[in-house]
Amino acid sequence: MKFNVGLGCALACLALAGCNRDQGAAAGGGGGKSSKSQLTKLGIEDVKVGTGDPAKVGDMVYMEYRGTLASGIEFDSNVPADPKNPDKAPFMFQLTNGQPTVIEGWNKGILGMKVGGERKLSIPYELAYGDKSQGPLIGPKTDLYFDVKLLYVIRPGHESDYGVTDIKQGSGRGVKKGDWVTITYTARLLNDLLVVDSKATPPGTLQFQAGTGELGGNNFVPITGVVDGVIGMKEGGERLLTLPPSLANNPMWHDDRVPAGSVIRFDVQLLRVSDKQGPTITVAPDASTKKP
C-alpha cells in the first residue's frame, strides 16, 4: 500500500522489518534526534462515538488518520487537504492479538471504536517505534499522537456482506436475474475519492445482463457486487452499493489510488430494463464530470 507520505509502511515497520523506504520513509522518518518521552501509558480519548458493533480482534478496519509529534508537527496524514477532493486512500489493517501489522499503539488504540467514530490516541514510544528512529522526524523514544476516524469494518466470516441503500425508488418492473439493464454509475472509495465515473467516457452507460454480468460477445462485467446488486431496482431508480473487496475487485483496474483490499461504493442509476440486449443509450457527461 502506498500513501504520499507513507503511513502504510511506517505503521507496519515495527512488526515487518525491512520495509521499503521508498514507500514509507516520511511517516516513520529516520535518524532524528532522540526525544524525551512524556507519556507513561496509551491515551485514548473519544471525540465522537460511532454506531454499530465495536471493532475487535480479527476485524479488518479502514481508517482516516493524522499523525503529529508532541510539538504539533505533522509527520503523516491521509486526510485530504480539500475534503471535497480527496486524493489519498483510506488506510486498512487487521486488528490482531499478538504479531501486529501496525504499531502496537494503533493495534490497541483502535479496539472498541465504532464506524464513524473519531478518537485521539496518545502513544508512548514503547508502543510506537521504541528506541528506533523512523525517518527525519521521528527519533528514538518519540511519543506519537494521532487523530483517527473509523470508516468501515469487515468482520471475519462476513467478507462477502455488502450494503444496499436505495437513494431513489424507480417505477415499473423490477430487475430480475437474466434481465438486461442499462446503468450509469460512479465508483468511489470510502472517503469519496473518485475512482470511475461512467459519464466521463462515451457513451457514458453500461449495459449488461443482471445476475450473470454478460456484456455480449462473450465478455462479462468483472464486478460481482454490481452484477447482483442491481436486482430488484426499477427504472429511474438510484442505488448505493457498498462493496467489500471480494465483490468490488476489478482486475482491469491499474490504479495506485485503489489499494488491494479497498471497499468501493458504487452509486448506480438504472436507465432501462428489458428482456434482451437493446440499443446503446448515450448520456452526455455532467459539467462537473472529471475523468479520474
Image: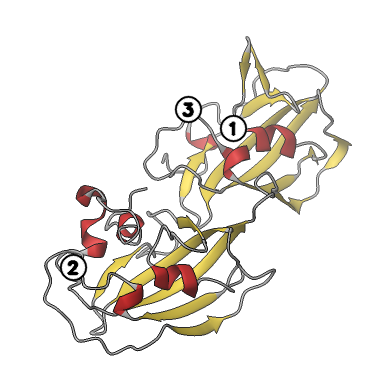
Q: Is residue 151 above or below residue 277?
A: below
Residue at 30% in and 60% down: 10
Query: Image quadrant of residue 74?
Result: bottom left
Q: Residue 252 carries which label?
A: 3
Q: Name the residue under label 2.
A: 133
Q: Earlier in the sequence, mark 3 or mark 2?
A: 2
Give the quarter of the figure containing the C terminus. Answer: top left
Residue furthest out toward the front: 98
Residue at 46% in and 52% down: 193
Query: Label 2 is placed on what type of residue?
Result: Ser
What kind of element bears circle 1?
Answer: loop
- Give the Cα distance between marks 1 and 2: 54 Å
- Give the Cα distance between marks 3 and 2: 39 Å
Q: Position of residue 217 (x, y in %)?
A: 63, 9
Crowding near the residue tagged with mark 2, few <14, some 14–19, many ≥20 C-alpha atoms within 10 Å? many
Q: Is residue 11 left or right of residue 236?
A: left
